Amino acid sequence: MGKKTGVNIIAVSIDDPKTSGKISPFVKSNDWDFEFYQDENMDLKRALNVICAPHLFLVNADNNIVWQHDSYKEGDEDEIYSKIKESIKK
């Protein structure tokens, strides 16, 4: 995806060990075209102080977090897309 758009998406699941076994088959069956990781122990979640999921981090080319968004409601994708376009221009 990054080669076409210049934007890379990385998904991280915070499912616990009881349900995490279902995640990889779900990802494979949906043929997601981005990187995917599992954070069963929630170490990354704690390190980044994520309170609720889903949580989005927009990271620039210098690996700095330039914007964050948590939760999801219909229409959020418009704001997210706008923030991505803004970050690409910089």
Image (cartoon, grey):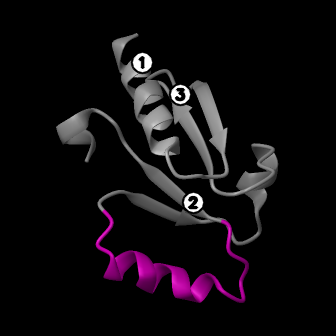
Q: Which marked residue is nearer to the observer: mark 2 or mark 1?
A: 1
User: What amino acid is labelled 2 in the image?
Assistant: Val
Identify which residue is drawn at 34% across, 36% down.
7
| 75 inside magenta stretch | no
Mark 2 to mark 1 CA distance (whole Å): 24 Å
Q: Which residues are magenta?
A: 14-32
Mark 3 to mark 2 CA distance (whole Å): 17 Å
User: What amino acid is labelled 3 in the image?
Assistant: Asn
Q: In the figure, is residue 34 to the left or right of 20?
A: left
User: What amino acid is labelled 1 in the image?
Assistant: Glu
- The crowd level at tag 1 (other Cα within 10 Å; few <14, some 14-19, many 20+) is few
* Residue 30, position as x, y percentages in the image: 33, 76
* Residue 39, position as x, y percentages in the image: 66, 65
- The crowd level at tag 3 (other Cα within 10 Å; few <14, some 14-19, many 20+) is few
| Residue topped by disc 2 | 12
Relative height, residue 41 to residue 46 (above, below): below
* Pick the front one: 73 or 87: 73
Identify which residue is drawn at 76% across, 55% down.
52
Q: Secondary structure at mark 2?
A: strand
Lower position in the chain sequence, tag 1 or tag 3? 3
Q: Report if the CB atoms under discs 2 and 1 are less than 8 Å apart.
A: no
Mark drawn on residue 63: 3
| Residue topped by disc 1 | 86
Q: Secondary structure at mark 1?
A: helix
- The crowd level at tag 2 (other Cα within 10 Å; few <14, some 14-19, many 20+) is some
Q: Secondary structure at mark 3?
A: loop
Identify which residue is drawn at 48% across, 25% down.
60
Q: Which marked residue is nearer to the observer: mark 1 or mark 3?
A: 1
